[in-house]
Image: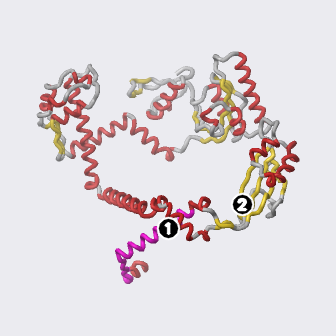
Amino acid sequence: QSGRVNEGALGWFSAFAMVYPFESAAYQTAVGSYSMPVRSKYGYHIIRVNGKRPSLGEIKLLHIMVRSDNNATPEAKAKAEEKAATCYNLLQQGTPFAEVVKLYSEDAGTARYGGQMRWLRSGELPPEIEETVFALTDSGTYTKPLQSIYGWHIFQLENRRPVPQFEKIRSQLEERILMDERGKLTQESFLDMLKKEYHARVYPENIKTLVGVMDSSVYSGNWNADVAADFTEPVFTFGSRTCAQKELAEYIAQTRRYNMKDSLSVIAREKCNALLQKELMAYEKLQLETKYPAFRYLMEEYNEGILLFNIMDEMVWSRAVKDSAGLRDFYGQHKGDYRWNERADISVYTVNDPSKLKAVAKLARKRAKLNMGAGDFVRQVCSSDTLPCVEVTDQLIERGEAMPLNGFNWKAGYAKTVQEGGKTSILVVNRLLPPTEKTFDEVQGQVTADYQNLLDEQWIASLRAKYPVKVNNDVLKKVSLQ
């Protein structure tokens, strides 16, 4: 094809090319040459190769978007361009991409995920954008503002990957082949084998008799199959299955509408063949466990596994979750087993604006006494800033756990300024909490797991009492020596 296909056509052609690899056509011919006619369900195709290039693989991007369509006023377009430039300047100043997304991106589909897009292949982005984003080589690099018919975009490369090795996607390709016309040929071949194995036989004369009571109401789906209620002659047989005329009549009546170009005889024959195939497949499924012992053993194991799972769920797992009174009673009896060690209530202040470092440090030391929330702290220190000048993280750390910053001192009121990863952070130990019992809400998950273990032990004990186990030690000794 000349030029570039539109997005819909490109999607169709990509899928078509994956399903019909033109080995003798475009993929193995020189640039400028033509293929032999290639057949598909859509018709015949002649492919001319205009150019070749190695696959670009796939890329994963983060996206900032400022909307501006072609119908916008000049003032709105200028405002959108200015906003895109603001985003780019913030990135240049070191503002994290996800933060700029949160503040400015107008792409609702990606903004909620920090701008993250799915994996993309060549042809899924507008041509004026694709060349630029696929030219990004290092993770974390980003484009300048790019314009499309939808507005302005800035993309950051998160990751990229080449075309997977054949063995890794073999199962996917096989599945796609089974879904196309070649898969239908495989199914038809299998059905032919079943027809021979089960001695399938069709009775055209009985189908013809049924056609005699069909009328034009069949085409609109209004035909009443009751007119054939007494027609009991077979239309096909196989194995132990016999399908009567009235069954075929009911099957024909289930379809709402038929093509007026098809005669009633054609409709009856095609529906008979479809019903025969359907019944053959259902019959074969019933024979699988008889024909294939390994499959039967697998199904038995599967069924027994489901039964065991359901019993375990009823006796242990769901019972522990639903028995709220028993759960709290178990917690009350074992409360001493759930305790916090000594903990430190700490706050980490990551300063984004160095000019506010002193103000942050001063207020951070007083914050515990002022009983000030993290949001109030940021609003007071960064009252005139568009972007927060400080990020506040409050947490409780149990003695022995990893510390958030180096140089931690286990002492109430301790404060330290740390330079890590190109950022300045202030750590403040607000207070130390003595060892204490954990509340039920704090430890409910662990209590539930422990209660389930208790129920499991009790259930196993009851089973042992009901079904005594006797071990043949002589045989066990022989097995252990092998």
Quarter assignment of residue 273: top left
Q: Is residue 436 left or right of residue 247?
A: right
Residue at the spot 73% in from the left edge and 53% down from the top edge? 394
Q: In the rendered view, would you say 56 is above or below 395?
A: above
Q: Position of 481 compared to 299: left or right? A: right
Q: Residue at x 17, y 38 (%)?
A: 236
- CA gap between label 2 and label 1 equals 29 Å
Q: Note whether residue 61 is visible.
A: no
What secondary structure prevails in the magenta region?
helix
Q: Quadrant of residue 158?
A: top right
Range shown magenta: 446-475
| x and y, in percent, of residue 166 in the image | 50, 44
453 magenta-colored? yes
Residue 116 position within the rendered picture, expressed as x and y whole percent measured from the top left: 63, 38
At 11% from the left edge and 36% from the top edge, which residue is drawn?
A: 233
Q: Which residue is mark 1?
A: 453
Mark 2 residue element: strand
Residue picked out by circle 2: 397
Amino acid type, mark 2? Ile
